[in-house]
Image (cartoon, rainbow, N blue to C red):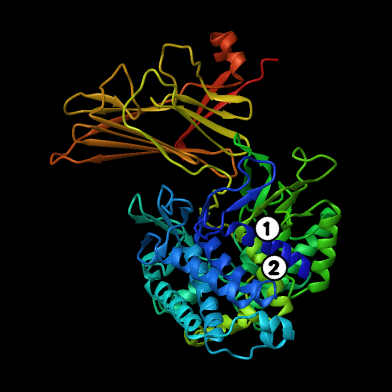
Amino acid sequence: MEEVAYRTWLYFKENLTQKSNFLPPDNYQEDRKPKVVMRTSSTNIGLALLAVMASYDLKFENLEDTLNLLYKMLETISGLTKWNGHLYNWYNIETLEPLIPKYVSSVDSGNFVGYLYVLKQFLIEKRENKNDEIYQNLSSEEKKQNVQITPDVLNKIDFMINVTDSLINNTDFSKLHDSENRLFSIGFNVEENKLTDSYYDLLASEARQTSLVAIAKKDITEKHWYNLSRTLTTLNNYKGLISWSGTSFEYLMPTINIEQYPGSILDESCKFMIMSQLEYAKKLGIPWGISEAAFNLKDLNNNYQYKAFGIPWLGLKRGLSDEIVTSSYGSILAIEEEPKLVIENLKNLSEKGMYNKYGFYESIDFTPGRTKNGYMPVKTYMAHHQGLILLSIDNLLNNGVIKKRFKQNPEIEAVDILLQEKMPENMITTKEEKEKIEKIKYVDYEDYTQRKYSKINENLNVSNVIANDNYTIVLDQYGNGYSKYGDLQVNRYKETDEAEQGIKFYIKNIRNKNIWTNTYSKNLRIPDKYDIIFSPEANKIVRNDENIRTVTKIIVDTDDPVEIRRLELKNNGVSEEVLEITALLEPVLSNAMQDFAHKAFNNLFVSFEYIDSINTIVVKRKSTH
């Protein structure tokens, strides 16, 4: 495992450079140009700090080099633009500017501050020159190579402790907490200046570190902790907490630095998750470690895509059994709990070509239709998963040193009692349907940039594509375009047609008889102001017509073939207005060539049904045979 740890450490050693401002690139992909993407997240940054610390714990680096690198990293971090003390979710590591749209993620901020608590204790250890276990285990030669604590070194350590303290104290978690429902929002959208209306409401979640840290800092009260759902599920007469996606990540990521107490509801649930992983993998005949990961599907820029994969009976999310992907880090997170089983699993992965330059590749995809010979290694390395692998091995080889450092902080020790909650003897076990949490996904495998156009350029064909595995929306600068399910076009569209085509809303002002669309129509009223914003996961159209502001947001569900178009109308005037709204869609439900060949004939096989009880129109295509 030392060799695995060393190769994993090389990811950070070779990429924490002046060019990256000593911040970790988000991912390294072997078959892509460029191999490294120059952006990073707050979780990546926190894990990179601890990766540098772990390189000393594991005797890969001496203390002088370790302290020098940490100093440079903290210098950069202290200068980053922040929101109420929080790091933004994504930064360009060359310019150090936050990526647009600016967003603050609750779970990523909680991770970052949690890891700062660990780093702070490591620095205090070195300042006090404690004869810790790690130093005692060094050979005489290794001790000579380690730096003496001179006044200059002491000043450097004090500076780093002060920076770490300042970062922790200035991060205000109350700004991300909804006091009415006592839950954390998934984050704050700085562009829209509001909390996202989705919440972390499960105890079995990667967000529980955010909860614990926020309570420890006294940013929120412990009532929040007891408001988290403790719904259980059962398997083989054992029981454990359910999560949203049933991933190893949700259960085990927080245990990198948070103590588990035998018999507690969290400890029993983590053991239950490991048992479920083994059971599910055995049934499928694959290595275990199912979690959120990159998988064998690439975008037009050759970037692997990313999503959550989990154990079906552990997760509330639908469709978890549809795809089969095993991540390397997913089992390594359990190495303290089940070292022999994890090492056996890693040997299995290694035999399948999963071990290379920076240790274990991201994942291995077993999903039919995406693989050759039954499986396909996903040959990329992701910073946060590399960090979790390295820290898991550090804990294994150094007696849970990361957990010990975290707990040594007095404010963390004060809330330690929350982690000791016992598994209830009697409790209703269920897997009831819950509202989906729209988790902030790592947009690591997309160029996450927004394109905003405020002026129509007739000489330029500007458009955007948003899609999931089987549903696609194409939209041009006018708001014209089409939606497609597989190879079936949902609405009529032919680029060479003179008529404007797409899915539109027509708005009529009853008072002054003005008519406009939510898009840009050459045939109707020209907007006073028009903006169309294209991003990888959404389209947004904003137009102003006199005192009425019309906003359209268009998204595709991350997993299911579902498209949502949301229309918002705002009256910026002083007089009441009555508006009439008509939605227009010309369905075809056939492939494009079939519709191009004979539109009138194609229309004959489309039927419509209005279901009054649910206020819904169902459109069907009858077979032509």
| Residue beneath the point at 22% across and 29% down | 528
Tell me: residue 556, above or below residue 148: above
Residue 469 x/y as whole percent: 63, 38
Is residue 75 depicted above or below 158 in this figure?
A: above
* Residue 396: % across, % down: 73, 76
What's the residue at 58%, 71% (across, down)? 50
Circle on res. 333 = 2
Of residue 253 and residue 486, the one placed in the foreground of this image is: 253
Near-viewer residue (355 or 104): 355
Residue type marked 2: Leu
Mark nearer the N terminus (1 vs 2): 1
Dot 2: what SS?
A: loop
Say few, some or many: other residues with alpha carbon within 10 Å of mark 2 (under 14 / 14 to 19 / 20 or more).
many
Task: Please give the name of the residue rendered at 50% of the width and 19% of the height, measured from the top-left corner.
Answer: 493
Pick the front one: 456 or 273: 456
Numbered mark located on residue 291 in the image: 1
Type of the residue with mark 1? Ser
* Residue 331: mark: none
Name the quarter where the N terminus is drawn: bottom right
